[in-house]
Image (cartoon, rainbow, N blue to C red):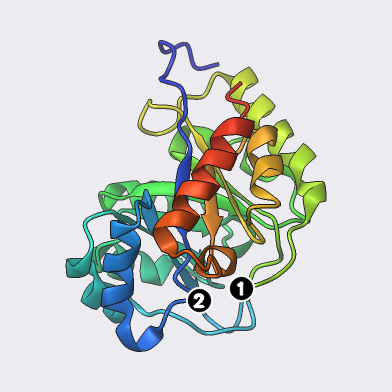
Amino acid sequence: MNTSSPTAPRSIQIVPSVLPADFARLGEECAALEAAGVDRIQWDVMDGVFVPNLTFGPDVIAACRPHASVMFEAHLMVADPDPMLDAYVGAGCEMLIIHAESITHLHRTLSRVAELGAQAAVAINPSTPIDAVAHVLDLVDMVLVMTVNPGFGGQAYIATMEPKIAALQQLISVNGSAGASGAGIDIEVDGGISAETIGGAAAAGANVLVSGSALYRYEEGLAHGVADLRCRAEAAFRAE
């Protein structure tokens, strides 16, 4: 058990996926998201193998990096992340999210992310039990619980993942894990997060909420959407 001193309370973070953005003007889209008050930006990296879609290579992300100062996280939905780690860190991604299902030697891969100077995180698909990450909590700063099956934006939120989120929070608490940085382990959810679903995810214990299609659908604009999602999450969030 980790016997380090208590960590600071986890705070709500609103993280947009850029999948719904205008790909012809991604740099401007990143700047607009930062101006809207997001906490970081997620890049959904898909290889057409691990998931049935293709998206962003490191050169695209590197081209957008000068347009925003907020943290970039790369969600590597790829069959073989190891050869890509250097390139995505080099492109300006301060956090790499590795799927537990995608790699044989998860401990080694997460350790390599840290060696490259980035924060490491681990993701699990809806059907993957939290046991898959129980023995790497000391290597990560965040665990992502997918609330859709990865591969496409705009999918419906799987509400039955909420007990899984709560169980993960309990696992982290019981283990006393402060994560790789010693500042505590964030719990992120990704998939179907909207004004209607964000409260359930936050009440279960998630503090990092990824929203894509729903955020871009706010008629009042991105800033209003970010503020509304943050308010709803903060009202529901169960920190412990």
Q: Position of residue 16 (x, y in %)?
A: 46, 60
Q: Amino acid at mark 2?
A: Pro
| Residue that numbered label 1 is attached to | 153
Q: Are marks 1 and 2 in contact (CB under 8 Å)?
A: yes
Residue identifier under label 2: 20
Q: In the displayed orientation, state which residue is furthest to the bottom.
A: 24
Q: Position of residue 106 (x, y in %)?
A: 53, 52
- Determine if residue 207 is in view: no
Instruction: Give x and y (percent) for residue 149.
Output: 71, 66
The answer to which quarter of the image holds residue 211 is: bottom right
Residue in view at x 23 percent, y 66 percent: 90
Please name the residue shown 49% across and 75% down the image.
19
**Residue furthest right in the image:** 160
Q: Quadrant of the C terminus?
A: top right
Label disc, if present, on residue 162 of the rendered structure: none
Give the residue drawn at x 27%, y 54%: 70
Q: Is residue 141 left or right of residue 164?
A: left
Of residues 82 and 65, the one drawn nearer to the viewer in this rendering: 65
Q: Residues within 10 Å of mark 2 (few under 14, many from 20)?
A: some
